[in-house]
Amino acid sequence: MQSTQFRRPAGRRWLAACVLAALSPGVHAYPVEVMSSVPMDTVVRPALGTMQTTLGEILSAETETGTAVVQNADKVTTAVTEAARTQREAENFNRQADRLEKARASYTVPDSICSESASGTAAQVSQATRATASKLAGGGGVSSAAVRETLASLPTTPRQGGYRSALIHAAYCTAEEAKLYGGTGLCPSVSALPGGDTEARSLYDGAGPAGKDPELTFTQAQTDAAMAYVNNSAKLDAGRTPGKGEIQTATGQEYQGLLTQYKAMQSAAMQPQLDMVAASQPQDATQAALTEARQAPSAESYFQQTASAQAKQTGTMSEREFEAFEVGRRYANTAWVTDLQAMDGDNLAREMARQQSLANWLALGIKNELRQANIISGQLLALAAKNEYAPQLQALSSQMSAGVSAQ
């Protein structure tokens, strides 16, 4: 309060001086220096300070906002760049994976459809089968002494041949025969292979009890039974082999000539059966192909379902069973159908080519069997012609001989 009263006269004096100066033209103005100002100090300067502080805060806020915007822009740019890079990498990976999958589908053979060596093995097995057939004709590969000696012997009289067949049959006695004359030398007991030398199933399914499962690969005992059947059905004795003295006569020479012709016909009659028995023998050449094929689960499951006991024990098959396995593990195997549905592209084309090649191979076998059948048909025609014309020719020959003698 005192300070206000003290300052008020000074202000009045300053105002009065200004008025006098304005009213007095002769009065000169002199510069003065204001050392202090209450409004400036109390109002203007604090307001300016406040404004300066506010402006500083605004500038700081704008700076921070700008910095945040720039940083956010950098982050957005970085995120966009990273997203684009990730997308490019994903697209490159997908394209690479697609190319690899196409390459795998085109050039990789799956284990489910393996056994590429089957085609090469088939030729080896076929050759081995043909060689086995020629051995069996002379008793080779037969363990039964009675059967082997009968097959290897020269032609004998029908009566002697009957004795041999009865001796062989003692090893294949049936339950019905055992009831009639069991315990004798011709039927000691019921055989484990009853009727093995008299029933055709010994050739097709392997000898054994009635109702057993078919077996396309024979055991040694089944091979002996099959060859006993061949002996009884095709190697029939029509006449004995003449001795050295007998064959030197004219009649002996004629007899030997007829016997030779008969043996030729007999060989043709035996050959289809020999081929069947030979095709039922286990062949070592099939082992590699079977090992490869059984790596596929579908082929292994089919093998376990259908393979013969001999094949499961030794890991080898006969030609007949090997062909049946190659065909059956595809057509008759539902597991293979599942594998086939999963195939596409070149692999599917390869499998179709394999099937066609297998069909061609089997068709070739059918053609060869038809050739054999045609040969046998021609021989039967020759026998029928002989039966028709031989009596007439012999009668005319007798007449011609009689006429010549009469002259």
Image: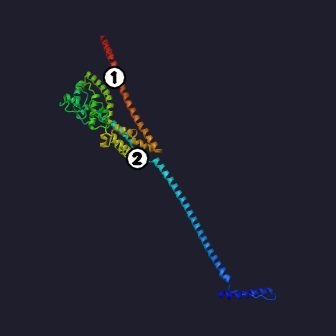
Q: Residue furthest right?
A: 25
* Distance of label 1 from label 2 (alpha carbons): 55 Å
- Name the colour scheme: rainbow
Left or right? Give the position of 352 relative to 207.
right
* Residue 285 can be seen, yes or no: no
Helix, strand or loop for disc 1: helix
Residue plotted at (39% across, 33% down): 366
Decide: is 326 above or below 151: below
Q: Which mark is residue 383?
A: 1
Residue 398 x/y as whole percent: 30, 14
Q: Quadrant of the C terminus?
A: top left
Q: Amino acid at mark 2?
A: Asp
Dot 1, crowdedness within 10 Å: few (<14), some or many (≥20)? Answer: few
Q: Amino acid at mark 1?
A: Leu
Where residue 378 sits, quadrant-wise, is top left
Q: Are marks 1 and 2 in contact (CB under 8 Å)?
A: no
Residue 141 x/y as whole percent: 27, 37
User: Marks 1 and 2: which is nearer the front?
Assistant: 2
Residue 98 x/y as whole percent: 49, 51
Decide: is 219 above or below 253: below
Helix, strand or loop for disc 2: helix
Sequence-earlier tag: 1 or 2:
2
Q: Which mark is residue 204?
A: none
- The residue labelled by disc 2 is 111
